Amino acid sequence: MSKDPASKDPMSHDHPAALEGLKVLDASTLFAGPLAATLLGDHGADVIKIEHPRGDPARTHGAQKDGVGLWWKMLSRNKRAITLVLSTPRGRELFLDLAADADVVIENFRPGTLERWGLGPDELRARNPRLVLARVTGFGQTGPYATRPGFGTLAEAMSGFAAMTGEPDGPPTLPPFGLADGVAALTTAFGIMTALRARESTGRGQVLDTAIIEPLLHLLGPGLIAYDQLGVLQPRTGNRSTNNAPRNTYRCADGQWVAVSTSAQSIAERVMRLVGAPELIDEPWFASGASRAEHVEELDAAVGAWIAARNRDEVVEAFEKAEAAVAPIYTAADVLADPHFNALGSIVTIDDDELGPVRFQNTPFRLSDTPGSVRSTGPRLGAHTAEILGGLGVGADELEQLRAQGVV
């Protein structure tokens, strides 16, 4: 595999990866659990992806090239893949053998499923008291909704996100990507690392319960406390904000779009001077973001007219010179071509055995001494079954029998 020079980590390092020596069993499917495992794998953990022989449904989600799922290649990077049916007696035994020296198990079966298979927390911790079991479900392990099927879309609806997203006169709006799953994955990875840190003191693992409906709820700001204390519900405002103005997306003369933010008072003043409306700065209502938001039509008219008369590059250059906050609204094509993303190493190029060179997101943060890295793309189904089960004493003859029996 290879990396473009422009996509290498910006800091050289001679240390082992931060999570080298950590063994993770990823028995989850689709997005939140697997992405949490990916984040650990990016920093050196040995992640073993355990799939049913029919494959993780994520293999067929999204765009395909020559029958190969592209999302899978990113989602399952830095993992070794085996097939194993945990509900079979031999599958259960092999899973327990794998868990015996693992540090983390990640699963997202409906509550009670692992217990029904004899693989619940009690059985796993009896075999390995130091194990951290991360359970990622739509609604958590307890409560009246625990047994419901749960997906990120439901979390985006029930967290309050959809209710406050969209145009004022339009319907509640869902994101066009796995927002709730992504936030839950980041939360789960943090929870796992917290449990591992606690293990250093206690010597014991523990169970992590992530309900996908909760992490996104934590990102939605003061909505709950505002309703609790004031009885106020945040309205849908489109791209505008109830906290400051001008804040919107604006169309340029060449048909491109930019986003403008004025969260800081000084930035708001710079924007109005730039667009030729300095007189608005002297208005009493201009002194705070909330009162500016009450005059959003007037502010948007001034900013929008100035931007509409100029091409995107001209707008961005002028805002940068004025030290005002603006960003071009990018597509994936823009991201891949952007010099700053490439300077940060945000995009990595990896050789894939099915697709050749592929480009996708690198690790989402950088450590100075132990930066993470993408070492491989998502593997073929069962690519490492013989290798990993061979380490448990499963020989070629037994492996063929297990295949014939549908265990792997």
Image (cartoon, rainbow, N blue to C red):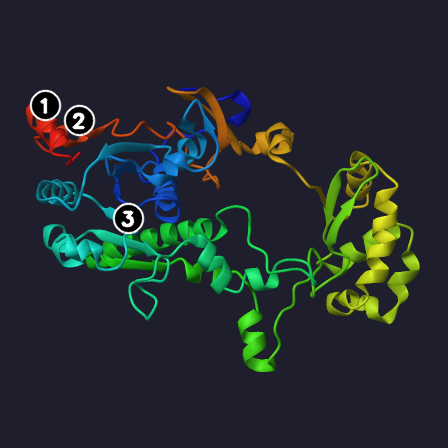
For disc 2, the marked residue is 386
What element does badge 2 sit on?
helix
Q: Quadrant of residue 239?
A: bottom right
For disc 3, the marked residue is 106
Relative to 259, residue 333 above or below: above
| Marks 1 & 2, CB-CB < 8 Å contact | yes
Residue at 73% x, 68% y is 290
Amino acid carrying mark 3 in the image? Ile
- Residue 396, given in percent of the width and then of the height, sits at 9, 23
Amino acid carrying mark 1 in the image? Ala
For disc 1, the marked residue is 396
| Image quadrant containing the N terminus | top left
What element does badge 1 sit on?
helix
329 sits to left or right of 306 = left
Give the mark, 3 or 2, whose residue is nearer the N terminus.
Answer: 3
- Residue 47, given in percent of the width and then of the height, sits at 28, 37
* Residue 133 seen by the camera: yes
64 sits to left or right of 293 = left
191 sits to left or right of 318 = left
357 sits to left or right of 45 = right
Give the mark, 1 or 2, whose residue is nearer the N terminus.
Answer: 2
